[in-house]
Image: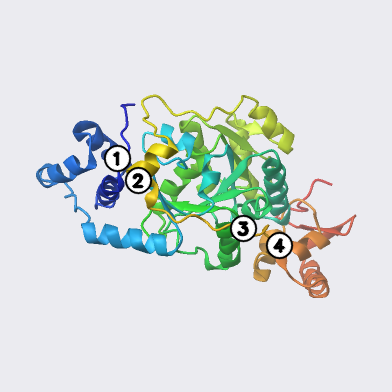
């Protein structure tokens, strides 16, 4: 890796943002051009002639649009975190396609902590959601930042479990866009107690092609990735593959072989991922001491120097807040069928996870039992009956 530069001052930082916001130019091209021309200003001057040699012309972002985006970010209380910023995630700097700039809301200093990513199925089972919350809470108490993508299911449960200790939501759109809308309450909680970050412009609506880019950030800033329930063809499996390519630890919780949501995790374990049964297994897997170091060839600046240069001025200091109240954020009541799986789940857990009143839940479970969809098992638990017989191993 070449000796990557950092913005020298606020004006240079705006040039960086203008360059990376240019159409048809991504992080890899950004760094190659910076290696060749050394400064963003020099790259911007050279782009008109360089674009003639490309199949897709690079449409340079206008200074006015970049300035407007920064103004909007500051009005939101956000921070522009460039590659040299003190709060830029240390492990993210190691990536060949490290984002030159991130936009963030909340407690940006959390991004410097050692982190573990927890990802998994959107249509997660009640047991899967419980595992995500419990693991996130336990690992958070051990000093880890819990990183995920703010999706429904496992992502949301992991964020919720780590609200008390610190969690980072890496989103596929702009940091001001709540997606999915059902996570509005959780988004607000993370913005207050954690941090929301993205490399995408403000106002950008997330699209399918954005999520693999987002996933590389989730894995890239983490020491390891824990997968809890994932189908074979899922975004979580993409994140796991990226983690392996980035040299991160890949871990998975095994599941019932008859549940499609377990196929991905079981396959990861077959392929060499660590089999995880408890948070202690993760701590053992990550037994090497965390070294908060810059990768070779990275220039760094002290906080004092950045303050003198003005580069750190494009941020709004988050206001101190009272200790965040931790609340259980239920999934949509209509997702009861998603919460049921091939493993027994307690009725009380179903009520808590779904937000359905216990009396109504028991009535709905009785209907499903009469339909032959579920079966009651000892311990006031229920299990989904899969095709071919009982779901559990009894």
Q: Residue at x 88, y 59 (%)?
A: 380
The residue where tag 4 is placed is 327
Label 3 secondary element? loop
Q: Quadrant of the N terminus?
A: top left
The residue mark sitting in front, 2 or 4, is: 2
Q: Report the mark closest to the observer, 1 or 3.
A: 1
Q: Residue at x 18, y 45 (%)?
A: 44
Image marks 4 and 1: residues in contact by CB distance under 8 Å? no
Q: Residues within 10 Å of mark 1 (few under 14, many from 20)?
A: some
Q: Is residue 6 left or right of residue 240?
A: left
Spatial distance from mark 4 to mark 3, Cα to Cα?
Answer: 21 Å
Choose between 324 and 357: the one closer to the eye.
324
Q: Earlier in the sequence, mark 4 or mark 3?
A: 3
Q: Which mark is residue 123?
A: 3
Q: Nearer the viewer, mark 3 or mark 2?
A: 2
Question: Pointer 2 and pointer 1: residues touching (CB < 8 Å)?
Answer: yes
Percent position of residue 154, x then y: 62, 52
Disc 2/disc 1 C-alpha distance (Å): 7 Å
Residue 328 is left or right of residue 196, and the answer is right
The span from disc 4 to disc 1 (Cα, nearest Å) is: 43 Å
Q: Which mark is residue 311?
A: 2
* Along the viewing direction, whichever of 10 and 394 lies nearer the viewer: 10
Percent position (x, y) of residue 3?
Answer: 31, 27
Secondary structure at numbered mark 4: loop
Question: Looking at this view, is 24 or 304 the one in front?
Answer: 304
Q: Which mark is residue 8?
A: 1
Determine whether, in the image, residue 126 is placed left or right of residue 215: right
């Amino acid at each position: 890796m070449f000796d990557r530069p950092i913005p020298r001052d606020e004006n240079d930082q705006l040039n960086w943002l203008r360059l990376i916001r240019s159409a048809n130019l991504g992080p890899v091209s950004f760094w190659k051009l910076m290696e060749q021309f050394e400064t963003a200003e020099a790259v911007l001057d050279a782009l008109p002639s360089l674009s003639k040699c490309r199949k897709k012309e690079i449409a340079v972002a206008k200074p006015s649009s970049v300035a407007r985006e920064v103004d909007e970010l500051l009005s939101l209380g956000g921070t522009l975190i460039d590659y040299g910023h003190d709060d830029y995630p240390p492990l993210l700097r190691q990536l060949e396609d490290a984002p030159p700039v991130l936009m963030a809301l909340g407690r940006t200093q959390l991004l410097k902590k050692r982190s573990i990513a927890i990802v998994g199925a959107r249509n997660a089972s009640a047991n899967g959601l419980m595992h995500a919350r419990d693991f996130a809470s336990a690992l958070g108490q051990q000093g880890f930042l819990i990183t995920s993508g703010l999706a429904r299911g496992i992502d949301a449960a992991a964020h919720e479990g780590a609200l008390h200790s610190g969690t980072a939501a890496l989103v596929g759109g702009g940091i001001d866009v709540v997606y999915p809308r059902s996570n509005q309450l959780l988004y607000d909680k993370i913005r207050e107690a954690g941090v929301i970050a993205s490399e995408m412009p403000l106002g950008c609506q997330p699209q399918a092609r954005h999520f693999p880019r987002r996933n590389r950030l989730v894995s890239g800033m983490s020491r390891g990735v824990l997968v809890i329930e994932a189908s074979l063809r899922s975004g979580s499996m993409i994140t796991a593959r990226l983690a392996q390519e980035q040299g991160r630890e890949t871990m998975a919780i095994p599941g019932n072989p008859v549940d499609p949501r377990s196929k991905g995790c079981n396959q990861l374990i077959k392929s060499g991922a660590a089999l995880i049964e408890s948070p202690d297994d993760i701590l053992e897997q990550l037994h090497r001491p965390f070294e908060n170091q810059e990768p070779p060839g990275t220039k760094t600046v002290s906080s004092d120097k950045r303050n003198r240069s003005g580069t750190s001025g494009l941020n709004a200091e988050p206001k101190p807040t009272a200790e965040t109240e931790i609340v259980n954020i239920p999934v949509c009541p209509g997702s009861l069928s998603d919460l049921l799986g091939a493993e027994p789940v307690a009725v009380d857990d179903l009520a808590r996870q779904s937000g359905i009143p216990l009396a109504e839940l028991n009535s709905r479970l009785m209907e499903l039992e009469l339909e032959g969809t579920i079966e009651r098992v000892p311990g006031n638990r229920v299990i989904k009956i899969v095709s071919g017989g009982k779901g559990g191993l009894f």
